[in-house]
Amino acid sequence: MIKVINVVGARPNFMKVAPIVEAMKRREREFTPLVVHTGQHYDAAMSDTFFSDLDLPQPDVYLGVGSASHAAQTAAVMERFEPVLIEEKPDWVLVVGDVNSTLACALVCVKLGVKVAHVEAGLRSRDRTMPEEINRLLTDQIADLLFTPSADADNNLLAEGIPAERIRLVGNVMIDSLIKHLPRAQESDTIRQDLQLNDYAVLTLHRPSNVDDLTTLKRILEAIEEIGKRIPVVFPVHPRTKKMILELPSIERLANTVGLWFIPPLGYLDFLGLYSRARLVLTDSGGIQEETSVLGIPCLTLRENTERPITVTMGTNKIVGTDTEKIVDAAFAALAETAKPAVRIPLWDGHTAERILDALG
Ligand code: UD1
C-alpha cells in the first residue's frame, strides 16, 4: 500500500489534485491518499467551493497559514507541515503547480528524506521577477520525481542538468478536471444566465506585476473599457486585484461602465461554465491559457511571457503584454476572426492522473 500526502494550498491547486485523489480512491488497494490543505487561500470563494465543485474530499489536515509576506507564508507552511510529515510518514508527497505552498512542502520533504513528486514540473517563463518562477525552479531541483505536461518542459529540465530518470512526461492533469466537469458546468450555466449575456468576453487578472502596480492596472483596464464598447466583458475579481482596483481614481467610472461586469471570484464549475462559452478570454493566469487552448477559445495573455509556450504554438493563446493599444487591437482582431477547431495537444487527454499513479506505484 502506497501512502501519499497530496498538498493543496491555493486556488490553482485544487483542479490539479482532485483527479489524482479520485484516481487513488479508485485504486484503493494500491493507494492511501491524504489531503493536506495549507490554507494559503482561505476565502470560501478561493477555496471551499472548489472542494464541492471538484468532488475533492475535505482535507485530512488543514494548516491554516493564511496570507502574509512570501517569506512569512512560506515559513509558516514549512513549520506547520513538518510535524504532519513526521506523524504520517507517507511513502510519497505530491505537490502541484508553482505556488508558495508547493515549494514550502517540497523543501520540508527533502529535509526529512521523504520522497516528493512535483506535478506540472518543467514550466519556465524565464522571468525571475515572478514569484512562481522561483517556486518552479527550486521545486524541480529538489523533487525526486518530476511529472511534466509537455515535451518543452522535459527539455527545460534536461537543460538545467536534471537527469532524465527523474522526469516523466504524463500530460496535463488540470485537463483531466476540465474534461470531467465540462458537461456539468455547461448544464448549470448560472452566471451567463444571471447576467443575461450571449456574446461576451471574460477577463481575469491577479499577477502581482499587473495588479500591484496601479499604472499597469490602469493601462489594462483602459483597454478593457474600450473592448467593453464592442462586447460585454465579465470580470470575476480576485481579492488581491479588488484591493488595488478600489484605490484607482477611476473606480467610480469603471464601476458604472456599461459593458463591464465586475463580479466576485467564481467557483470552478461556474467559471468553467462562463469561459467555455465566451467569444474571447483575456487573462494573466497560466492555467486559463491551457484550458482555453483545449476548448478552442481565443485567449489573449496580458503578460510579456508565458511558461506554457505550447498554448501559443499549438493552442489559441497570444501573448499581448499590457499596453492599452496592443490589447485593444489584439482583442478586435480576435473578435473579427472566425472560430478555429480546438487542437489536440499530446497527452492532454483526461488520463494524466492514471499515468501519475502508474509512475508512483
Ligand atoms: C497565489 C499564487 C499564484 C496563483 C494565485 C491564484 C503564490 C506566490 N502565488 O497568488 O501563483 O496564481 O494564488 O489565485 O503562491 N486573499 C484573500 N483571500 C484568500 C487568499 C488571498 O483575501 O483566500 C488576498 C490576501 O489579501 C492576500 C492576497 O489576496 O494578501 C494575495 O494572496 P496570495 O495567496 O499571497 O497570492 P495570490 O495573489 O492569490
Image (tube, helix red, strand yellow):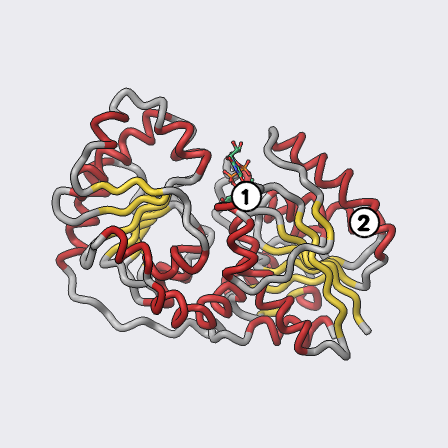
User: Residue at the spot x=26%, y=35% of the render?
Assistant: 221
Q: Quadrant of the C terminus?
A: bottom right
- Mark 1 or 2, closer to the camera: 2
Disc 1 within 8 angstroms of ligand 1 (CB): yes
Task: Give the mark nearest the N terminus, 1 or 2.
Answer: 2
What residue did someone put label 2 on? 84
Report the side of 294 relative to 176 (left or right): left
Question: Residue 119: image x %, image y %?
Answer: 61, 60
Q: Nearer the viewer, residue 314 or 12?
A: 12
Badge 2 local density, few (<14 within 10 Å), some, or many (20+)?
Answer: some
The disc labelled 2 sits on which kind of residue? Val
Quarter holding the N terminus is: bottom right
- Tell me the quarter of the picture where residue 163 sits: bottom right
Q: Which secondary structure lies at badge 1?
A: helix
Q: Return the residue found at the far top.
A: 249
Q: Answer whether residue 173 is visible to the viewer in this image.
A: yes
Where is residue 234 drawn, in percent x and y? 28, 47
Q: Residue at x 76, y 41 (%)?
A: 80
**Residue 34 x, y percent position in the rendering:** 73, 61
Q: Relative to 289, is 71 on the left or the right?
A: right
Q: Is residue 167 left or right of residue 92?
A: left
Residue drawn at point x = 24 percent, y = 25 percent? 252
Q: Is residue 307 above or below residue 254?
A: below
Query: What amino acid does circle 1 point to?
Result: Glu
Instruction: Tell me if I can see residue 314 in this picture.
Output: no
Q: Which mark, by number, is residue 132?
A: 1
